[in-house]
Amino acid sequence: MKNRTIKAGRLFIHKNGIRAGVTVFLLTLLAACGADDNAPDMPLGDRSIGFSTTVEDTQTRSGALATNNLLSMGIFAYYTGSNDLTISEKPNFMYNQEVKRSNASSPWTYSPVKYWPNNPGDKLTFFAYAPYVKEATGSNPSFRPATDKGYPILDYIVSAKDNDQTDLLVSIPPSMNLTYGTNNGKVSLHMSHALTRVSAYVKSGDNVQGKQVTVFSMQATKKATLIYRDPTPSYNKYASWSYINPIETITVSPSATLPFTVPAVKDEKKLLADFFLLPAARINESDHKFSITYTTAGTASSGDAPVQTVTLSNQTLPSMDKWEFGAYVSYTFLIEKQKLTVTATSHPTWGDAGTGTVTGSVVITYAENESTPNWSNGGSGSVDGKPVVTHSTVQNDVQWEDGGTEIVEKS
């Protein structure tokens, strides 16, 4: 054959003055150019990687994620050949790969599609979080560079308003050292809540009408880093939060319109705020305080002012030890004319809207005379603008109400 030249992957044949072109795809050459040395070989046949997800709890709060409303997630994946994953590896297979679907019945999709290695013994490991955020300055959570070795690390910042706070899911346990034959090419991800859900309810301790909450806030941890890790006998989760000292706090408050009317019927409860916060158990429990201002109506015959304004600042929250990874704790603020009782209830699941166990309480009373016997400063407070001495009685022992339960209405 004469006059044969090869240019840019095409074979040109000149014969009898007629030029014909045949496209030659040099797969081997193309695969070698710019590829990660640790990436698996090109697939033989359809061995695309598919995903399925489950979320540990049902959705009961706007913004909370569950199996039926989880529509996006980010994936970090590692290819390790025939070896198991170690912390010396980089996310060389997927780095914050967006995986999404249009609804709960739709399949998970992503682009470009990735494939299982041809070698049946080669392994992939997958870590996931949700919802997906594009890695960019100011994203929440944010991530370490793709060149960093080790398991994924997520930096998270709490927003000030409850409606702006986002549920955060992570895959626990991660899908470690999978081959195509592990689950016929499908990666099953079990997603768990990484934050603490904290709800605040208000109710009246008497039948006095006209009570209103005009100010409400909590102090919470502002920043933390989520680190995937190997479990230990004392901590059996595959992820934990790390905090930088000194711990920075943030004032969080409800998005509900204030003043917020307290139900007039005694013991009827109403949701004031529903927060997604960083777990604080055994970290900086004493920094987590609450502040509240409320008004109660008086009567002229009793000698009270027509409206009494009570302000209680930097007060103790009970059961801070229950603010665990993925826990749900609700607080009920029982408002009476001379007293505020805060009761903590721990719920067995994140989305539990039924029975929970009472785990502690704080009873706050106040007096205008600092010399009143048996009173101590439990924070700062005022009644109708005049300073008062507050007295807090904290009961964190679960035996305080042995086996006590409380019904939490669906929000």
Image: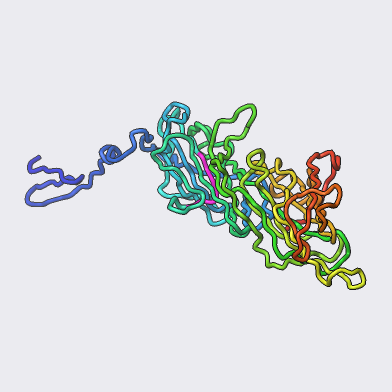
Residue at the spot x=82%, y=54% of the render?
A: 365
Residue situated furthest right in the rendering? 301
Instruction: State which quarter of the image contains the C terminus.
Output: bottom right
355 is higher (above) or lower (below) than 179: below
- Scheme of image coloration: rainbow
Query: Which residues make up the magenta segment?
Result: 127-133
> Could you say where residue 325 lies in the image, as x and y percent from the top left?
64, 41
Q: Is residue 388 left or right of residue 247?
A: right
> Could you say where residue 353 lies in the image, as x and y percent from the top left?
75, 52
30 is higher (above) or lower (below) than 307: above
Q: Is residue 43 left or right of residue 271?
A: left
> Could you say where residue 367 lies in the image, as x and y percent from the top left?
83, 56
Residue at the spot x=10%, y=52% of the render?
A: 18
Residue 253: image quadrant is bottom right
> Could you say where residue 304 lies in the image, as x and y percent from the top left?
86, 68
In the image shown, does 335 or 387 lie closer to the viewer? 387
Residue 332: image quadrant is bottom right
Any part of residue 104 in sight = no
Residue at the spot x=64%, y=29% of the render?
A: 234
In the image shown, does 126 or 167 lie closer to the viewer? 167
Q: Looking at the image, how many numbered discs can be counted on the residues?
A: 0
Any part of residue 29 in sight = yes
In the image shown, does 39 or 232 lie closer to the viewer? 232
Instruction: State which quarter of the image contains the N terminus.
Output: top left
Does the magenta-highlighted stretch encompass residue 211?
Answer: no
Residue at the spot x=57%, y=49% of the render?
A: 222
Does the magenta-highlighted stretch encompass residue 131?
Answer: yes
Q: Is residue 293 left or right of residue 133?
A: right
